[in-house]
Amino acid sequence: MGCEKGIPNIFSNLLFPRIFQSFRMAIQPSKLIIAFMALAIICLAGWMMDLNKTVAATANTQGKITELQIYIANPARVDSYIKENKEKGEFAGVFSTLWNFASVKFHGTLNSLFALDAPGIVANITEYFAAVKWAFKYHFVYSIIFFVIKLAVIAIAGGSLCRISALQFAKGEKPGITEALRFSRKKFASFFTTPIAPIGVIVFIGLFIFLLGLITNIPVVGEIIMAVSMPLAILAGLVIVAVLIGTAAGFNLMYPAIAYDSSDCFDAISRSFSYVCSKPWRMGFYSAIAVVYGAICYTFVRFLAFLLLTVTRQFLQFGVWVDSSSKEINKLAAIWPEPSFVNLFSQHSTLSLSWSESLAFFLIHLFVLIIVGLVISFVISFYFSANTIIYAALRNRVDNTDLQDIYTCLDGSENEEIIESTSSEKSRTESD
């Protein structure tokens, strides 16, 4: 009997199965709305900034070859490619170029994951970060402006999603959108500065090594000072490496730390670094489960979206027998190309369509983009939900903090209401 009672206790002490709650938490309507609004703002900002097209591109039968693809294939050829194509005057936007490239790499990573192709996963992730490096190297001003906008939006939306996830996981509560946004607004400074604070530390320490390099230019004395100061330079480099590793490993825990414990910037960084250093293997195990489970859930959600569009289009097709006014193809095929699982909306040239067909094409494209946006919103919501659960599990193992412990505090207006109600009750009691 003792053994039978012990078995449930063993499984109840395991925390990794709780990660599987991420799907149910991620599809919560309020979280999807917040994620969709954030995605819409980021995309709208990117598309508006893309009105000034600066990416050199070359027309191709399969689309456009951009300087980003040249950079990934051979970085040494980029400068000459840009110079050659400046005279042709064919350009693309930075945001659209990065968006298309990131989409390809994201699905490439998923395919490699399901195929258990570790080199393929590493190659896709490496090329994605190479694309980010290309953007900052060749389009620095654009990238800085867009990065600040994106970080501000994520600070509000990501903080709200983590707060909802934390309250739902710890207390079983489902706060509304307004309440979650109010929390992230009050903690905006922490959410905004936490991801970039490690970069500031790295730059500050790197400045010391840079100054040492400048001193080396001094004849005779310079190289002696550099040699004598080498231990300090190596120590500075060691700190930079430690910060890089800690940031890469603990980055996913920073927002949940603020959402759970109302931490400030440095406390959130300290907690994330501490939990990763204390339980590195457990952190890796939890993250691996979240990645695999998230990939399966994303595939399922994308299949549902594909099935929705396919069924809708097929029933429409049953009723459309008229050909397009400008092409010898079915009218529905002209204004709504058949979707596929890989590409939910296949685009084609609308130059040969009539004005009414072009308008219908645009509206259908817009509605399908909303469906695609909801799929991406699920990915965003799942990311923050899963990492919030992982943070709570690690905090429980490292600090022995109960999973139900979470920072709760009333805002100023509610405090005033409580004070007013208390004083009024006191006055009534005195009068009685």
Image: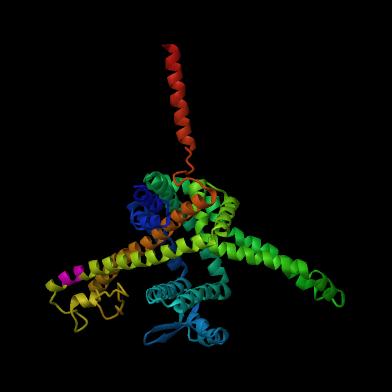
At horizontal 87% and vertical 74% (from top left) the residue drawn is 221
Q: Which residue is drawn at 60% across and 52% down?
A: 266
Judge whether residue 313 is colored magenta. Answer: yes
Left or right of 310 in this view: 54:
right
Quadrant containing the C terminus in the rendered view: top left
Q: Is 70 contained in the magenta span?
A: no
Residue 182 pos. (x, y %): 45, 45
Magenta region, residue range: 311-316
Q: Main secondary structure of the magenta part?
A: helix
The outermost residue toward the top is 432
Q: Position of residue 154 (x, y in %)?
A: 47, 58
**Residue 91 vs residue 260, the one in the foreground:** 260
Q: Residue furthest front?
A: 1
Closer to us: 26 or 3: 3
On screen, residue 116 versus residue 210, left or right, reads: left
Is 181 located above or below residue 414 in the figure? below
Q: Count numbered badges in the picture.
A: 0
Q: Can residue 62 be seen in this view?
A: yes
Can you tell which quarter of the image residue 300 is in?
Answer: bottom left
18 relative position to 240: left or right? left
Q: Residue at x 36, y 61 (%)?
A: 378
Q: Residue furthest right?
A: 220
Q: Is residue 206 visible?
A: no
Of residues 55 and 106, the one nearer the viewer is 106
Q: Position of residue 90 (x, y in %)?
A: 46, 82
x and y percentages locating residue 88 in the rendered image: 48, 86
